[in-house]
Amino acid sequence: MTISEKSNESELYGERFISDAEIVCFPNPSPNRTYEISIELPEFTCQCPFSGYPDFAIIRLLYQPGEKVLELKSMKLYVNSFRNRKISHEEVANKMLDDFVAAANPSWMQLEADFNPRGNVHTVVRVSHGLKNNC
C-alpha cells in the first residue's frame, strides 16, 4: 500500500490509537515511600468552544502516587484525544484531573494547563486533588 492510498483510508493508525486511548496505570514500585512524579506535556491542543480556533497549552502534572502510577504512552494518547474537541480551558483542566484521579487514585495531584496567549490573554488553570505530603 502506498502513502497516498493510506491517506485515503477513513482512519489512520495514529487516529485509531488516539480514539481508542485509555489511561493505563501500573503498580507503584515504592508504595510505602512518599515521592512526587512530574510530567510535562508541551504539545496539547484543543479548540475554543466559542470560536472554533485552536488553543495550545503545556499541561503540567505533579502528583504523589498511591498504589498506582500513570503510564506515559497512554497519557500521551489520552491528551491527544482533545485535539479536535471544543472545550474551555477550565473544563480541560478539570476533566483531565478527574480522569487521572479516577485512573490512578493518587494521594495528591495537581494539574496545570498553561495556555498560549491568544488575543493578548494568557490563561493558566490549576486544579488539585487531595492533600500534599512532604517528601
Image (cartoon, rainbow, N blue to C red):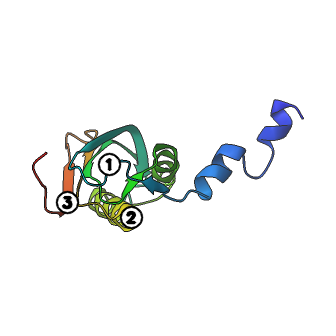
* Cβ atoms under marks 1 and 3 closer than 8 Å: no
Give how far apart the Cα atoms at labels 2 and 1 are: 23 Å
Residue under the point 33% across and 66% down: 98
Residue 54 vertical position relative to residue 50 in the rendered view, above or below: above
- Identity of the amino acid at label 3? Ser
Q: What residue type is labelled 1?
A: Ser
Where is residue 62? Give x, y as percent. Answer: 25, 47
The answer to whether mark 2 and mark 1 are in CB contact below 8 A is no
Q: Which mark is residue 128?
A: 3
Most distant residue in the right direction? 1
Instruction: Name the front one of labels 2 and 1.
Output: 1
Q: What residue type is labelled 2?
A: Asp
CA neighbours of label 2 inside 10 A, class few (<14), some (14 to 19), many (20+) = some
| Crowd around label 3: few <14 · some 14–19 · many ≥20 (10 Å) | some
Which residue is denoted by mark 2 in the rendering? 99
Q: Where is residue 130 in the image (x, y as percent from the top left)?
A: 18, 65
Camera-side residue of 114 and 134: 134
Q: What's the distance in space between the residues labelled 1 and 3, CA to CA?
A: 23 Å
In three-dimensional space, the C-alpha distance between marks 3 and 2, rounded to whole angstroms, equals 12 Å
Q: What residue is disc 1 on? A: 30
- Position of 96 relative to 113 (above/below): below
Mark 2 and mark 1 lie on one chain; the one further toward the N terminus is 1
Secondary structure of the residue carrying numbered label 1: loop
Q: How many labels does the image show?
A: 3
* Residue at 28% over, 39% down: 116
> N-terminal of the two: label 3 or label 2?
2
Please tell me how crowded label 1 is: few (under 14), some (14-19), or many (20+) other residues with Cα within 10 Å: few
Q: Residue furthest left?
A: 134
